[in-house]
Each structure stands twice: as C-alpha cells, then as structure tokens.
Image (cartoon, coloured by chain):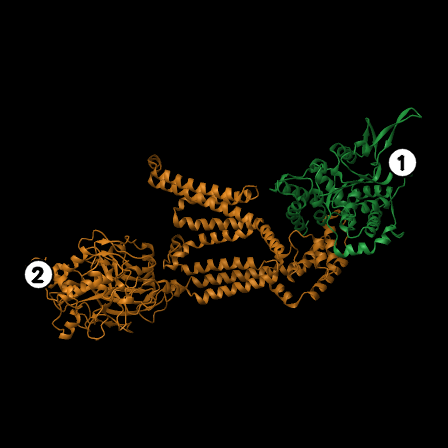
Amino acid sequence: MGIENAHSVVTRLSNRLKKIVMGRDHVIDLLLVALLSDGHVLLEDYPGSGKTTLAKTLGDSIIDDLPDDDISGFRRIQFTPDLLPSDVTGINVFDAEHNKFYFRRGPIFAYLVLADEINRTSPKVQSAMLEAMAEKQVTVDNVSYPLDELFFVIATQNPLDLVGTYPLPVAQLDRFLFKIRMDYIPRDEEIKVLSTYRERKTGPPADYPRVERREIVEARKIIENEVYISPDVNECLVDIARTIRANRSVLHGISTRSLVLMLPAMQVASLMKGRDYVSCEDVVLLAPYVFGHRMELAPGVDDGAAIVKECINEPVEKLTRKTLTRR
Amino acid sequence: MRTKDESEMTSILRILNTGIFQIFAVSIWIISTISWVVQFSHPLILPLIIPLVIAGYFLGNRISRTALTVKGIIVSSIMLYLLARLGSFLITSSALLSEILGTMGAYILSEAVFWSAILFATVFVCRILSMRNPALLSLEMILTSILLTSPFWAHRMGFINRPIPLIDRTWYYGIDPRAVFLAIGFGICFVLFFVISNRRESKKSVLDIFLFFILLLLLFFFIPLSKIQKFVAGTGGNDKGKSSTPSPTPSRSQKPSGGSSSPSHDKSSGKEDENSQTEMQNSASSGSDVPVAVVNLHDDYMPLDGYYYFRQTAFSQYNGIRLVKDETGAADLDILEDFPQGETKVALENIEPGESPPVKPDEKESSCYKYLETTVGMITSHTRPFGLVNLYLYKPMQNLDPDRFDRIYNVGSYVRIKPYEAVLGKPVGSKKWNEKLWAHYTEAPPDPRYIELANEIISKIDLKYRNDPIIQALAIKLWLDENCTYSLKCAHAESKDPTASFLFGDRTGYCVYTAHSACYLMRSLGIPSRVCGGYAVDERYRGGSSTIMILGKYSHLWPELYIEGLGWIIIDIAPKKSLEPPPEAPDQNLQSMMGDMVRKGSSPSKNTPPHPSLKIDFRPFLKAMLIFFLLALVVLYCIKIVRRALPYFSQVSDLPRTAFVSALDLLGEGGFIREYGESREAFADKIRAVSPSFRTLTDIHLSSFFGRSQRRDYDKNKILEIYGKTKKEASEKIPIFRKLIGFLNPLSWLLTK
C-alpha cells in the first residue's frame, strides 16, 4: 500500500461525508485530518447543527472488518450530570450461571464515539473518558481493557447555556487534537440542505464507497512515513510557539507536545491537498485549531484561535520568504 | 471599511516590526535628538543621551507588548521628568559637586541628567503609544520632524548660520551651505520617494508620487527662498507697505492727511543718556529679530554717543498733527529719495556737492568730522538707501548674491568725532536758509502748552547759558530722559494730538513720541529741528569686528537740530525708566558671517565675474548626486533584468526557484503582490484568473523547497514551458498602463516576496 492508497482512503471518506453533510466541508476536512492523524476532536456548536449526522456518517463510512471483536462502528454517548464512569466504560457483571464476574463493555468500545455535551457531566466521568482517549484503554476494577486501534472521539460542547456545566480545564482540552468552533452554514448551503433532505435520508448512494477499518489504520502509518516535513517547517513551528508564548494576551503558552501533535496533522492535511510534503499552507490551516485551545488566556480574552492567527503571521511569512532564497 | 482599515493598521504594525525599519527609526530618533541637543544644550552630553534614546526606543517596543497600561506609563514618564528636573536642580545647586567637577562640569552633568531623562521618556512613551495604536505613529513622526527641523527654524528669522556646527564647517571648507541644504532636502525626498513607491498597491504608489511632486512644485514656486526673508522681515526701515509685523500703530491716527508716509518705527529703542551709558534700555518687541541689513566699516570708528545711527528718512514738515516728510522739495536735501543709478553725492551743509572727499570746507569745523566709508548689504528691501550719519556719498555696487541681498552699495559718511562740548555756543540754523525754510524747520503745534513746558525747562538752566540754543536743546533732552517712561504699550495713538497726549499725559511711550516731543519743544523755542528715522545700533553689538548687523528691532526715530557749519546733530532721547525688558545682543557668529557675505557678494565693477567660491561647489555636488542617482538606477534595472532572465541560465536544480521568482517579479509589476501572511498556494489560487499556470509553477517550486532533498530530477523543458505559459497569461491579463508602470519602476523587484 502506497501513498496513493492513503490518498484514496481520504478522498473516499471525504466524498461520502460531503455528500451527506452539506456546508461543512471545512469541518469535514479537519475531522478527517484528526481521524488519520490519530487525534480527537472537540466541536463547539449549537444543537441541531449536524454534528450527529456528521459523526454517524463517518461511522457508517467505516467498514468493520473485524466483526468478531464485539466493537461496533459508531456509538453516541449523551453526557448528563448523573452519568457514572461505568456508564461509559462498562462494568463487571456477576454471571450467576457461571458463578463469576464478566466485563460488560460500555459504549466507549467503538471505532467512533460521539461524546455529546461532554461538559455536562461530572469531572469523574470526564476523566474516565479522557483516560480512554489518551491511553486507548479502559480500566475497570484494576483490569485494563484495550480499545481498538482506530478509536476516534468526537466530543461536543454547547458554547451557550453554561449553567450546571463542568467546563473542561486546559489540561483536559489538551487531549483533543482540534477544537473546532462551528458557525451557521451559508445561506445557499442551508437551502440545499432543505431541498436534498429526503434523498440524503437514505444514506449515501452506492457510488460513494466506504473504507475498511484496516485501510484507515494502514493509511495512518503510510502518511507518517511518506509525507515529508522539512526542517524549515519545524523551525517555523517553534517560532510560532515562541511568538505565542511572548504574546501579552497569553498567560501560559502552548506546550512542546502540541507542536509534536501538529506534525501528523500537517502530514494528513498535505496529503489531502495531494502533496507529499508539508507546506506553509498546512501550518496556516491547522495552527489555530491545534493551538487555539491549549493556552491559558489573560482575563477578558477568550478567542485563542484569533491570537494564534495573529501570532503565526510573522513566522509563516518568514518561512514563505525563505522559499525564495537559494539553497 | 472598518476591517479594511484594521488590516491596513496591522500591516503597518508589521512593517514597524521589521529589522530595517527599526534601524531606520532608531537612527531618525538619534539624529533628531542630536540636532535638538546641540542647539539647546552642551554637545558633551551626547554620549550619555544617545544610548539612552536607543534604550528608550527598544524598551518602549518591549514594554508595549506587556500588559502595562498607557496611563501608568505616561504617569511614570511624568514622574521621571519631575525627578530629572529635581536632579538637575540639585546638581547645579550642590556646592560639593561643583567643587569636585568644577562649575562647568556640574553644569554639564545637570544638563546631561535633565535632557537624558526627558529624551528617554519621550522616546519611550512615543514608542509605546505608536506600538499600541499605529495611528499614534504620526505623533512620533511629527515629534521627530520637529526635533529634526528645529536647527533650521532660525532661518525663517534670518539666522542663516544655523545649525552653527554644520554651517561653520561648510564655510571653513569653502562650500556654500545652500548646497548642503539642498543635499539634505534631496536625501529626504529620496527617502520619501523610496517609501511611497513601495506601497502595496501600485495605484496608491502612483498617486502618492504624483502628490509628492505637486507638493515639491508648490514648495518651489510658492515659497521661493529669497522671498521668505523679505516677507518675515519685520519693520525694516521705511519698508512700511510690506511691514508684516503687527504694530501698536500710532500710524493709524497719526497718519497725515497727505498720507505719504507714516513711520513704522514703533518697535524702537529708548536710550540712556549718551554720556553716561551706564544702562542700556534698548528694547524691542519680539518678531523683529530679523537682520534687515549688514554694514561693513572700512575703517575703525567708535561713535561718541555709543550708537551707530543710520539715517534713512527725515520728517520735518508739520501737517497739523505730526511731522511728515517734506513736500516742498526745499528741505531735507541730505536724504536720498530713492536708489540712484550711479554714484551720487548728497548736499551736506558743510560740504559742497561735487567735491571729492575728504573735504575741508571750513578749517575750524572740519575737525569735528571724519570721512568713513562703509558697505551696506540690504537683506530686506527698502524704499531708499540709508547710511551711517551723515551720508555723503552713495555708490551702488554689483550684487553678486541676489538670493541673499536685496542690494549692496557703498556709503561715504562724515561721522562726528567731537563731543557736544565742542559745538556749544554755535548758532543754530543756517545763514543760507530763507524765511520759508526757517519757518519750515521751526513750525510747532499751536498748542500753548509746548512753549510753556519749554520755558519751564529752560528756566532751570544757569542764566549764563540760558540763551544758548544748544544748551536749551540738551536741557530738553535731559528733561525728557528724566521724565519719560519707555514702553511699547501706550494708548496715545488714538488721541487727536498723540504727542500732546504723551507729553502732557503719562509720558509713557516710545521713540515716536519722545522724538516728536523733543522736536516740538525745541521748535517752540525757535530751534530748527526735525525728526529722523532709520536704525540705531549699540556700539557694543559690533563685538570688535568691522561688521554691524542691523536687525529689524533696531529701527528708531530720533530728533535732530541744525547747527551752523555742522549740519544736523542728533540729540536722542533715552528715557531712564523703561517698562520693556533689556534686549539681547545679536548673534556674533551670524554677524561676522553676514559681513563676509557682503564682502564676497559685492563687486565694485559691473564687469567682474562672480566670485568663484559661491558657485563652484554647488554644481559638482549636484552633478555627483545626479551621477549617483543614475548609477543607482542602472544598477537597479540591471538587477531587474538579471532576475527576469535567470530561469534561462540557471541549473536544473535551481530552476524551480528562479522561474518562480521571475514569475513573481512579473506579477508584482502588474500589481499582483502576495499579502503579508498569505501562503504561496493561497496567493496562486487568488490570481488563478490571471494565470492558471502559476499555480503549477508554485507547486513545483514549493515541492522543490519543502520536499525531500533527493528529488531534484526536474524536467527543465517542462518547467520552462510552464514558466513561459505563466508569463504569457500574465501579460495578456495585466493592463498596459500597469505593465508600463511596473516596467519603469526600478524598485518593482523589491516588492517580490
């Protein structure tokens, strides 16, 4: 399997999703970047903006090639204040027939988990969820159960209506590769959504092929190996981090880990553009979503992405101009 | 609109952060502080101030990024200012420090403390303000322009020797400072031109350059240099019509019905008793510190009464209100009415016209006078010549420096060398005068109070001398000296008889009133007298050189009486009480420089070629400038051409880059320039309508830069083909005028980024 196959995986997924979910091309691209770079996504949006459709379509697009592993393609968990960790992870149940406990898997055992309104639940549920995300395993009664290699979480939170919520601290937000703030879709797209409602209800037509779970996992490895990141780009990333840390609206700048997380994401983004090298464009595209939620902001400042956009200008410009120099 | 403005603002901010700009801005700050400090303080403090200015600049940059509020910064700067004031005060008042460092050392230290704190705080606050809000950058620009141009302000007042260190040096090497000023102006224009031709949108650049040239043309045609001085020159002599300085006009009410003239000598000087010379009260109002003329003495001469009098005009005809210029044509023949074409001699009482000087018409009296030649260089235009009292010979000279001098002429004068005592006992008036002339010079106002006052004054004279008219005149002078108060602010001008209002009122006024009072009092005693106008310059201002610089504020009116065999003798009134501050001496440096200029700028014959030193340094300098400019142009165009042709000559491994750069140059000429922070791909997509092939070229270039280094197997012909296609597409889409502008702009390749 070569880089062309990886590209085809991305294209197939992208085509399917864009067919069903309208007006969200940008979010779909980011979602696929996260999926293929083994990260998780936090969507910040209002109810009814199509996130379930999005997650469900993505879940549907993945063929479960291991039907015996008892891990389903897609699960949705609606987080509420009274939810318990075991409701997410699963629980040891006593089997009277065999006279022993056996582990009953929770909804987190899926390829794709939609964690709806993650800020509504108590911190202990959040932490159980986040442990799963970080370690790709759950631990119940001191026994760890591994999750699938393709474990991808799309969490959402409502930016309004914050009464009775438990906002995620920066350290937990750090588990998400992207935090994407979704806006209302453009007028024309919205009209299109209404007019194509019925045909999309049945799911994507057959000429939009699905991808196998295995393909995605392999594509991840290929992209990591094949898409080249120039040392100049790394330099630029470090410059961005330093600029952000020096910004007066930022109390606590981004970590080195976030720079490391940026690398696979950029590789996927490059591949989606049909390139086998990372370019300035990828930095500009991804930096606000990767870095925006990983900073402690000064009181009164709330738009981290805007600060990142401001801070990347200079290093990116430097890198862009560098391309004109002779090597 | 708002977002556009904001993006413009942020782009300005970005420019501010570039290294070249920082160096540029710091050096402008440094130069402007130097030009300020050398004027207002001691140059020795510069080594301390310059590092602090640099520190202020960079610290300001740094602090502007912190959360410190502007209010706090400004308050702390004000505190710093107050501290500096206190510190410098403490240093100068500390006996210990002046003991250790010496008086001069302590002074320099206090100046250094004061100015370094002020300039540091200024630069610091300015920097923070303009970093926080780019619109406030204009504040910084205005401030630096003020500092930078401050040495040249004095030029508007006629002080053409400023900044002294620069002008001194240029004169020393024999260079005309005007060439230096032109070079400075040229440099500024060049920088401005460079800045505005680099705007992001070439349309804006073209507009800017157009406006810039319009501005230059306006400056050149509507404010010609030589006119500036004439315009600002205040109350220069009899230059009444052009007098631009507002005056506490006595002229309005004192204006004679004939309206031929009215003295504008309201800014005048009151003088101390000539004999005592203990205190000088020569006062002047502000705004007339402008040199109106320069006089070079050909021989050493010290006036007896401490003042050089330059007579320009005489008022002897009483018109019912005041004295005006003679209209009969029989009196005041020693006054030249205009500038004669050739050498002219004046009818002096004791010298027959046509005789060659020095003459001795009367052996007994001639020893009272000495013949003295002077050269007068008029800076502001006057209606008639003036010369050292008594002017006898007028000889126009060729003016080789018409930008500087209105005209230059030589004057031969008979200057008095005997004191008053020598003339005592002589009869007043002249035997040659007819009845009419006698009446002309002795006609006083019919007001009986004048004769009463005159009689009262002479009643105090010793009986032995009471009938001597010269003693009577001196008594009147001394009485007026004693009883008048010199002041430029007085309300007599509005009354019907201003002189009576002055003399019989509060006796507070200036030379117009004192001179008229003295003249009327003398005339009421039958002493022929008149009021003369011109300039009176304190002898001490000459400062040992042979040059007397006449400033506008030296204009003056004084009374004169006629003595048989001697002619008109000045008896000036100098009130002992004055409400005006004592004047400052003129700039000695400027004075001697102007003297040199008169010497160089005058030529006795009309046929002599211009003095070489004035013009010779000017042209090579301009020529060198032109050559430099042309060379720079050639170099810039060469770079442009080489960059354009490079793809055809470069190696395959470097071809993607050179082709891309060349295509970027081409697009830049057409006004398609990548925005700051915009990625190459986004730019290529943006101009896809102009050149679709450019996107391919961009991809090839970027993959060569960002891709794996081993992949360098490019197809040369393919790249060149794409490059050619890009060129073709672009030149089809770019309008001709844009192409032309881009083609002609030698700096267009600098826009490529």
Depth check, front residue: B493 or B234? B493
| Res B557 quadrant in image | bottom left
A33 left or right of B527?
right
**Secondary element type, mark 2:** loop
Relative to A145, is A303 above or below? below
| Residue identifier under label 2 | B466
What is the x, y in percent for residue A288? 69, 45
Q: Quadrant of the C terminus of chain B?
A: bottom right
Q: Colour of chain B?
A: orange
Q: Quadrant of the N terminus of chain B?
A: bottom right
A104 left or right of B82?
right
Identify the residue at image location x=90%, y=51%.
A206
Depth check, front residue: B268 or B178? B268
Labels 1, 2: one chain: no
The three-letter code of the residue at mark 2 reads: Arg
What is the x, y in percent for residue A166? 71, 36
Q: Are marks 1 and 2 in contact (CB under 8 Å)?
A: no
Relative to B332, is B138 above or below? above
| Residue identifier under label 1 | A69
Q: Is residue B372 visible?
A: no
Host chain of mark 1: A
* Chain letter matching colour green: A
Depth check, front residue: B121 or A322? B121
Residue extending farthest to the top is A99
